[in-house]
Structures are given as structure tokens and as C-alpha cells.
Image (cartoon, coloured by chain):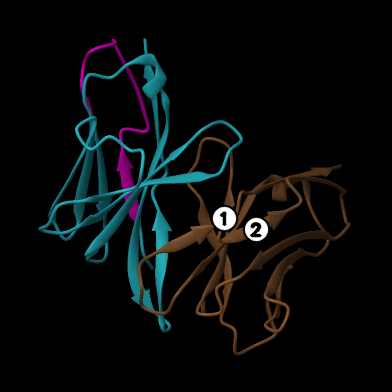
Amino acid sequence: GAVVSQHPSRVICKSGTSVKIECRSLDFQATTMFWYRQFPKKSLMLMATSNEGSKATYEQGVEKDKFLINHASLTLSTLTVTSAHPEDSSFYICSASKYGSGANVLTFGAGSRLTVL
Amino acid sequence: QQQVKQSPQSLIVQKGGISIINCAYENTAFDYFPWYQQFPGKGPALLIAIRPDVSEKKEGRFTISFNKSAKQFSLHIMDSQPGDSATYFCAASIGTGNQFYFGTGTSLTVIP
């Protein structure tokens, strides 16, 4: 199987602080990982595509200086929300792709609920 | 521009009934169509997927119907159960490419 672990599952921080979220592929190597943001009862909004050893590709409208993504190894990508503000409160989900059955299969982490006070 | 259009936005079904969620796409290069199930506070989980060389794929109570000419695919949940209550997302991707396009999601509620 393909398992993606995301940590922490919940984090509460004060406005102005930075928060790091980790995404790990536990049983496979993921050259590509994705970061999504999801608002309540809304769809998945792709924030950025993270490739191991290179700079992340950000979607239009996503501030790269605000949401720092690092993909230093084939099993770990991190998202750092810098100088967080209440409007950054959201559900952040990572995913990793693994090739199988003729396609890249996407496996998601359990998500991280960020609350900025 | 929404690459994959999903309907309905929400669905209420009686226990034992059939839940049907529809998706449509425009890009004929798409060749992998997964469905994801998401429970509140959790990440989406792959439910079932189909490739366009078959018109139907069944796994337990879940069936994907695929209509290549109409560029549509749908998820059917037979004998729907309260435990099926979740949000369902359809998606599409191209071969070995990494870009996945998601539908807007359908919130399914199965009433006991």
C-alpha cells in the first residue's frame, strides 16, 4: 500500500508566529508531493506542487513567501506558514503520488487543522 | 476554469437506496479517473478508480460507470448506509503526469 503521514493533526498558534507541517510518505518514495488547502465544506484548493530537490511550483494567488515548502528528501515535504494570521486558519492536506497500474495514484495525508488566534 | 465538473453539490439518500454522483470533463487526454471519499476532519481516501478502456468498474457496493463519448463518469453506491455519509470527490489525471484535477465535491448524507 501507500501511506502518507501528516503531522501535526491540529495546531493552534498565536498571530505572527510560524507553523511547520510535515508530510511523510512512509512506505514509498515520492518525487512529487502536493499541498492543498480546504475551507469548510469546500473543495480541495491546490496550493503548490513540491518536487524533491527543487523549488516548489505555486498556484496562482498563493504567496510563496507566506507558505514555504521544502521537499528535501524523497519521503518528506514540509509546509511552513510564516507569520500566521487568523485568515490563514484552515485545513491543510498533503498528498504524494506513487506510480502504479499505469497511472500516478494520489495518496493523501490525514490533514492538519491550523487555528491562528 | 473547472476541468472536472461535479454534481450534485449535496445528496440525501435513504438507507438501502442508491446514491449517484456525476462528473463531466472536457479534456480527452484524461485517462485516469479516481473517486475519493472524505470524512469530516480527515484527508480524502481513494475509493475506486477507472481507466477509459472500460465502461464500468465495480468494487463491492461501489461502481464507476464511464461514458467516453459523453465525457462523463459517475459513482454509484448501492445499498447506501449511514456510514457512507461523507464528501465524495471525483478527479482526473493524464497518464504518468502528476496534475490531478478535482471536482467540487458532493456531500452525501444517508438517512437511517
Chain under callout 1: B
Residue where numbered disc 1 is placed: B2
Q: In which quarter of the image is the C terminus of chain B?
A: top right
Q: Residues within 10 Å of mark 1 (few under 14, many from 20)?
A: few
Q: Do labels 2 and 1 share a chain?
A: yes
Please report the bounds of the magenta region as a residue range. A4-19
Instruction: Indicate the quadrant where residue B95 lies.
Output: bottom left
What amino acid does circle 2 point to?
Lys
Residue at x-position 70% and y-position 72%: B72
In the drawing, does residue B21 fall left or right of residue B43? right
Q: Colour of chain B?
A: brown
User: Can residue B60 be seen at all in this image of the molecule?
Assistant: no
**Residue A16 x/y as whole percent:** 23, 12
User: Can residue B54 be seen at all in this image of the molecule?
Assistant: yes
What amino acid does circle 1 point to?
Gln
Residue at x-position 51% and y-position 76%: B30
Residue B5 has which mark? Answer: 2
In the drawing, does residue B29 fall left or right of residue A57? right
Q: How crowded is mark 2: few (under 14 residues within 10 Å), some or many (20 or more)?
A: many
**Residue B52 part of the magenta segment:** no
Q: Chain A is drawn in which colour?
A: cyan
Residue at x-position 22% and y-position 19%: A83
Q: Separation of disc 2 and disc 1 at Cα?
A: 6 Å
Task: Say what secondary structure mark 1 lies in.
Answer: loop
Instruction: Indicate the quadrant where residue A97 lies.
Output: bottom left
**Residue B106 x/y as whole percent:** 69, 48
CB of mark 2 within 8 Å of CB of mark 1? yes
Q: Quadrant of the N terminus of chain B?
A: bottom right
